[in-house]
Amino acid sequence: MTGHARISLAAWAATVLGSLVLTPVFSGPFLFISAFLCAIITGVGVLLQNLRAPRVVVPIVQLLVLVELLSLFFLHDTMKFGLVPTGGTAIEFNSQLVNAMSSINQYSAPLPPDGNLLLFATTVIAVTGLLIHVIAVQLRQAAWAGLLLLIMYTVPAATVHGGLPALLFIPPAVGYIVLLSAEGRSRLSRWGRRISGVSHLDAAEPVEASALGQAGRRIGLSVVALAALIPALLPALPEGVIGNGLAGGGTGGTGIGTSISTTDPMLDMGKNLKQGANNVALTYKGGPSGGTYLRLTALDQFDGNTWRISDRGKGRKIDDELVPPGYTGDRSQLPKVKMEVEVGKYFRSQFAPIPYPAQSISLRRDWAYNVSSLDVFSSDGAVVSGKKYTVTSYDLRPTEAQLRNVISRGAPDQFTDQVPRVPQKIKDLALQVTAGTDNNKYAQAVALQKYFRTDGGFTYSTANQRGSGMKAIEDFLLENKTGYCEQFATGMALMARLVGIPSRVGIGFLPGQAGKDGQYTVRMHDMHAWPELYFEGIGWVRFEPTPAARVASTPDWTVPSPDSANPTTAPTTVPTTPGQTEDPNISKPNNGRDQTDLGGGAAFDSGNWFTNGGARTIGIVALVVLVLLIPWILRSLNRRKRFSRPPSRLAAEGLWSEIRDTSRDLGLDWNDVATPRQSGEWLITKLPDEAHPSALRLARSIEAMRYAGAADLDVDLRPDTSAIRKALWKQATARRRWRARLLPPSWRWYLSRGTTEASDLLDEFDLLLARLRSTILRRRHAN
């Protein structure tokens, strides 16, 4: 194989291996299509070089072939005669790339399957492969091609939320090493005849760069191993050190805008409030007097670390009337309001901002809704930016009496009453805040809201960077009491679950600023989070725990009248319409559904020190101790193996190696090049008189076995070896003995030898390929 062909194939392999880092970002068959396109480009380059085409012509032809292939694969309808790209092809290509960038800025990884994204990913990889081929083959600077592989890795590593898996660094690193090895071998092959390598091969073969190749492979092996291990051992960098994820981040007034992803809406909301530009998100006309909250989605699943959207399926098409989940009254009697919404170009979201609960919406094609949450979302990956639509919603305003007299029968789903493991102090706080409410769910909810807004001493500030995981909530509730709507909403939702009220967290916008002609303007910094609590027969009801520094007032139904502390009205199981009175002949229950010690929350175990973090601490300490003991463990196992062998040549060599390692462990200067007799004489100078005969017998036995071939292999040398070891340990200082136990220097020698043997396996692989090539060439010549 010629040198340029070898480097070309290595460049193709490096491109394919490097493109593996994009698998957490893109979906679909982009990797296979890209590999095929790069293979065609590589084949064209090799063919032209074999035909001795001018160097400058090769990349031009490759680029033309790439354009033709991309057009055939993705833009076939725009080509003339189905074969020739036209100006329309270029326009459509640019349009699809713009749409792909829009989707990239909208969604979190992994990006949804989409034709625009498939074209984008394939184009990026194919162009990268072409550039790598030009740099490595045409310019003969393979080392610089590594910059392209580095860029291909660092871009997703810096933008994917949570970072890439550490092992994904290995494929591009291996590809780079393959490319460098191919170029180095081609350079050395120009020197002429073989100077080292497999002796039985034909001397006319290209030179086998064993020394240089071995050094390069060992360096590459070490770098790849370190790159795989170090990220696993070091803590993750805080978000924002490199990037903020594909989903997020606000931009300046001329930027691409702000997005709310389906992966982590809470995280994106926090970014928009703290970092994003305060661009106009949307405007609307109509609706209730004084404006209305506009909701995007509801987070109903909490695992102790993240509030997220549960798996709700594909949703339903918006063909019929939307039904408020949980409401069992007569919907025809509910007042309705209509409003017109226009979403600005800077707000990119798969969710449509609408009031809750909506009855109908003019979005139809490629939009769907979820029955349990009434989220309206795009079903094909489109964004809501620039959309204009009309929405009609129910003006559902439950009365205090309706909420107070509801009978609770549990959560409407499997998520909204689930409580992860919670610190006991938070449970105690929930009981303390809701004390005196007689387990009435409405009274408990009002008490929680009042605690967060006024009585608890909380302060509103967006400086809180800790999020809404359990540790962050614990710190917010019990320590600093400073946060913004994320902490207030999630804190109240969690405490509501603890006292038995199903809850979730709504994400959306505050009503915005009123303007002329009844138009309201909602900006990015109007994004907000609030808790929604479930009341049987009424459904999900919004509460507002965020202090007046952010939200001036609370919903009317969350403010009890002064004389309602001990109501005499009896409950109904379901309301009819807001404002309608209840049947006074039904007695009010004292409790809701099956209660626990916290008034009906989902069952959980309070745990103890061991279950609440103690087991993890013990595990970490045990792991650290185990890692520190690895040298001692390996050294002890090796020594036991050597002494367990019956008398033989292998056993004698093992015992001699044990004396060598013991000497090194105790800080003695063992000479690797000395003969057994010289080593024995040296040992005598380090041992007391009673151990001299054992040292002489062991040294002479090894000498006779190695050089004279007259050694008695049935002689058991283990007693002599054991006596020498004990004498050496007795002569050493206490410090030397402890060091030999905890960190034996001989272990480091074996570690070095292990890495050498690992890289030698690569050399053996090279030799195997060389032998196979030699065999094939001999048979070809013989034929």
Image (spheres, rainbow, N blue to C red):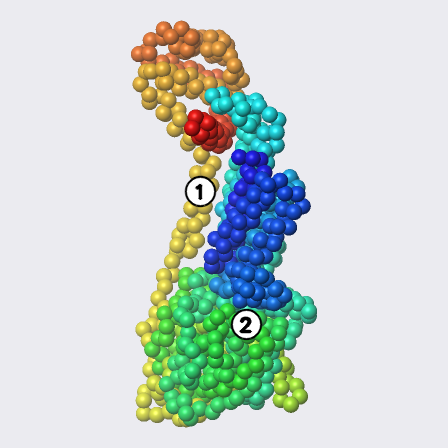
In this orientation, which residue lies closer to the viewer: 231 or 582?
231
In this orientation, which residue lies closer to the viewer: 540 or 580?
540
Q: Is residue 77 above or below residue 694?
A: below
Residue at 59% of width from left, 86% of height from top? Answer: 285
Residue at 57% of width from left, 42% of height from top? Answer: 46
| Quarter of the figure with residue 134 | top right
Q: Amino acid at mark 1?
A: Leu
Residue at 33% of width from left, 21% of height from top? Answer: 645
**Do we see residue 25 in this rendering?**
yes
Residue at 53% of width from left, 85% of height from top? Answer: 390
Q: Position of residue 154 (x, y in %)?
A: 59, 51
Q: Secondary structure at mark 2?
A: loop
Q: Secondary structure at mark 1?
A: helix
Q: Is residue 604 left or right of residue 149?
A: left
| Quarter of the figure with residue 119 | bottom right
Please report contact status of discs 2 and 1: CB closer than 8 Å, yes or no.
no
**Do we see residue 23 in this rendering?**
no
**Marks 2 and 1: which is nearer the front?**
2
Name the residue beneath numbered marker 1.
623
Name the residue beneath numbered marker 2.
383
Q: Is residue 176 above or below residue 724?
A: below
Rendered-image quadrant of the C terminus = top left
Q: Label 2 vs label 1: CA separation?
A: 48 Å
Any mark on residue 501, and which?
none
